[in-house]
Amino acid sequence: MKPLATALGLFLLLLLLASSTTTNAHNITKILAKHPEFSTFNHYLTATHLAADINRRETITVLALDNSAMSSLLSKGLSLYTLKNVLALHVLVDYFGSRKLHQITNGTTLTSTVFQSTGNAPGTSGYINITDLKGGKVGFGTSDNDGKLDAVYVKSVQEIPYNISILQISQPLNSAEAEAPTAEPSKLNLTEILSKQGCKAFSDLLIATGADATFSETIDGGLTVFCPTDSVIKGFMPKYKNLTAAQKTSLMLYHGIPEYEPLQSLKSSNGIVNTLATDGANKYDFTVQNDGNDVTLKTKVNTATITGTLKDEEPLIVFKIDKVLMPRELFKADEVAAAPKSSKSKSKHKEADAFAPSPSDEDPADQAADNNGVAGLDGRRLVLAVLSMCIGVLLLM
Ligand SMILES: *[C@@H]1O[C@H](CO)[C@@H](O)[C@H](O)[C@H]1NC(C)=O
Ligand SMILES: *[C@@H]1O[C@H](CO)[C@@H](O)[C@H](O)[C@H]1NC(C)=O
Ligand SMILES: *[C@@H]1O[C@H](CO)[C@@H](O)[C@H](O)[C@H]1NC(C)=O
Ligand SMILES: *[C@@H]1O[C@H](CO)[C@@H](O)[C@H](O)[C@H]1NC(C)=O
Ligand SMILES: *[C@@H]1O[C@H](CO)[C@@H](O)[C@H](O)[C@H]1NC(C)=O
Ligand SMILES: *[C@@H]1O[C@H](CO)[C@@H](O)[C@H](O)[C@H]1NC(C)=O
């Protein structure tokens, strides 16, 4: 009985880990690319960075506008930043399949949107009223629109149950609040932002290596920066000075990922991420993993913890971290690992509960083993490899 329960536990854990390594379950750009009548809408989802936001979320409904509905919206001459608010109003943070649409309790509901969740929407202006109308029609309107339902449901474009639903509606939703002119965010100067807030040493190294140019070019498409704070950089300088010029640049690029990833998104999408240093055979990746309330970044050599957010202004986010991230492409695991424990034994893996993912209890010997044995495997295959090892142990019991 006990081995069965243990095996079941391991199986559930496998499912959990396998799903937690999936970062993008859907890709709105790819889905809409199959429907040319939404090409303008699709283009503006990308141009406003809303597409990335949609892909990050689960349980979401996109109210799609076809090219003629989009041309009536574009004729208003809104700036891209204002247009983003209007389009964000067309993304509901709940799942409405075409069936659910016709089964709304009491025939009417108010539902929240991405515009509401940006914090740019005053009062209830970020909510959409969905109402079952007579004759099987379903109406949509913003809640700051004098009770007018501007648009009706046309058809279902694609539904992936409880992940993403794309429904075509007849007209753009009007909202005075969303259409209010939005100031263009000031052009973000990364090195200037860093230098003022405890990341001067990191900023200086970015400039010295020339890596700042790559970081700056990446900002518009989304950029997450992990900055080891000034005292951390100071302690690391002996190791840094040992690197060649090209290696120094790679080390700096290793501290950026070419996507805007706020903390809650890092927390919910644990797994392997590529960095600005990633380039074909040189993987330069690391693993994002939760540790209680903390988010840790695990390279094959060391583990850093996010200690704070220095700047969050989409498309740029900068986190402070407590260690310089050391990629295995540049450093050996034993440079930081303590002497390996000799009593390392597989018996610790016999019980399912020994498997609770807790990065802090992984000893340096395990890390070194990872490095030698399965460094080339991705997260999911790693889980499978460890799992099959454990099942092997179970069968021997
Ligand atoms: C829905 O999303 C989850 C988590 O991202 C994923 O594991 C699952 O496969 C998705 N469902 C479908 C039907 O694609
Ligand atoms: C989504 O699909 C588009 C078009 O196929 C592709 O260019 C883009 O890289 C994809 N995005 C992600 C996050 O996979
Ligand atoms: C539906 O209407 C009834 C009676 O007016 C009300 O008590 C109930 O709260 C409503 N349900 C929802 C989900 O709005
Ligand atoms: C939605 O709008 C309709 C029409 O103006 C109104 O009758 C209904 O009460 C509204 N629903 C909610 C939940 O506010
Ligand atoms: C950023 O600011 C620094 C210092 O103020 C300045 O020297 C640098 O030229 C600026 N970089 C860009 C790309 O504007
Ligand atoms: C620098 O490199 C040399 C030669 O590889 C090595 O012996 C030394 O320990 C390194 N110094 C530091 C601080 O890593």
Image: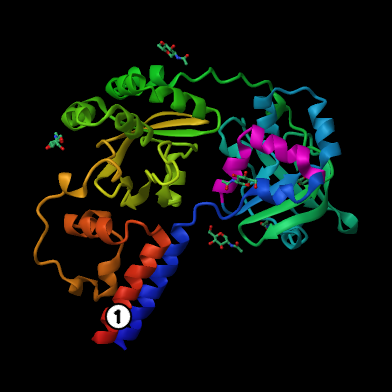
Question: Mark 1: which amino acid?
Answer: Gly
Determine the main secondary structure of the stretch shown in magenta.
helix
Specify whether residue 336 is in view. no
Q: Residue 295: horizontal and vertical position, in percent?
A: 34, 46
Q: How is the image coloured?
A: rainbow
Q: Is residue 102 above or below residue 279?
A: below
Q: Residues within 10 Å of mark 1 (few under 14, many from 20)?
A: few
Residue 146, position in %: x, y?
Answer: 79, 34
Query: Could you tell me which residue is drawn at 70 percent across and 35 percent down?
Result: 44
- The residue carrying mark 1 is 392
Residue 114 visible in the shown view: yes
Horizontally, residue 171 falls left or right of residue 355, namely right
Spot occupied by residue 149 in the image (x, y as percentages of width and height) = 82, 42
User: What secondary structure is found at the residue carrying circle 1?
Assistant: helix
Residue at the spot x=70%, y=22% of the render? 79
- Identify which residue is drawn at 38% across, 79% down: 8
Seen from this angle, which residue lies furthest right?
135
- Residue 40 versus residue 311 in the image, above or below: below
Which image quadrant is residue 114 in?
Answer: top right
- At x 30% / y 43%, what residue is drawn? 329
Q: Is residue 307 magenta?
A: no
For this view, does 218 lie left or right of residue 362?
right
Disc 1 residue lies near ligand 1 with CB under 8 A: no
Region in magenta:
37-57
Q: Ligand 1, what quadrant? A: bottom right
Q: Residue furthest bottom?
A: 1
